[in-house]
Image (cartoon, grey):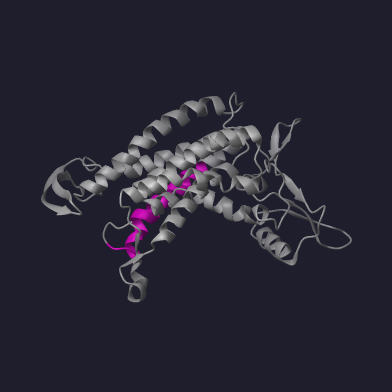
Amino acid sequence: MLGFLDDVFDIRWRHKLPIPIIACIPLLIVYYSERGATDVVVPIPLRWLLGTLINLGPLYYVYMSLLSTFCTNSINILAGINGSEVSQAVVIAVSVILNDLLYLPWAFGFRIPLPIHVTDGVKVGGVWSAGMAYGSRILVERHLFSLYFMLPLLGVCLGFMYHNWYPARAFPGDTLCYVTGMAFAVVGIQAHFSKTLLLFFLPQIFNFVLSCPQLFGLVPCPRHRVPRYDPETQLLHPSRAEFKDKRPTALATLVLRVFSALGLVQLEFDERSGEVARTTNLTILNVFLLRLGPMREDSLTKVLIATQVCGSLVAFFVRYGLAGLVYDGNRR
């Protein structure tokens, strides 16, 4: 509903950012009513200082509300071309589903008996297969819960993607971004794999960090930062932001010069003052066009999908290949 109201009334960014915090209040209440843990496992290198577990208390609820805000808005700011929003949701949903399947009893195709014991009033053990749950009924139930959300979400997104692909006949608006982002936040929080979930958002994290100078006012931020369309060639080009009303601050100039040195933006300077006059908008879509050259809209969406898939592959490698260096056992 909040996403729909955003589409109807065209809410400004400064008012739009807190909306997911309001929307996640019922989620936090459910988490609290189910005696949700607020303990965090400390990485092995820091345990000499902080111990094995640290209780964040109310700060953990602040973290969960910020996670909900990030999941919704990170998809929303990586948007503007046909298929971009829904394709992100599809790849992330598939990644979460694959992660869930690793924890189901039949994950590795055979079953082994495990001793039954009681943990927090719940029976753990019995006859389970050698999946990543390692005999934990709680882990299996958590990832089944996640599947109950992700499978319908994936089906809806695939159906919508058919109509939203270039040339689109339907558009997602903020409604789809809020629905998908909050769905990911719900399963990440309620199924207790929020850190793994964030790994599936690596392209969105990069895009958010890149966008921060514009989102927080260091660099002029147009209402829409979508790539510029050339009707003659039907190709997309990087869009630009101009310093019209105010001169760039020293911090803004430093940040833009660093981004320029990394090949993330293209700058134009004022001939008289030598100051930055224009810059390409700070989004990953404009970076693709800057590095790969102008391309058709559907081609740019395919590049975004490929990037999202590569990000998920890196996430699985980090989660199941490198996590053992800083966490022991199956802790997440």
Rendering quarter of residue 250: bottom right
Apparent side of residue 205 relative to residue 236 in the rendered image (left or right)? left
At horizontal 35% and vertical 58% (from top left) the residue drawn is 38
Q: Up-down: is 229 above or below 293? A: above
Query: What is the span of residues highlighted in magenta in the rendered image?
Result: 306-328
Apparent side of residue 238 relative to residue 150 in the rendered image (left or right)? right
Farthest bottom residue in view: 48
At horizontal 38% and vertical 53% (from top left) the residue drawn is 317
Q: Which percent across, then down, holds residue 318?
A: 39, 56
Q: Up-down: is 115 above or below 161? A: below
Residue 310: in magenta span: yes
Please count the marks in the image. 0
Viewer-side residue, 179 vs 240: 179
Q: Determine if residue 52 is in view.
A: yes
Q: Which percent across, then down, holds residue 3?
A: 55, 36
Apparent side of residue 211 relative to residue 118 in the rendered image (left or right)? right
Viewer-side residue, 249 vs 9: 9
Prevalent SS, magenta region: helix
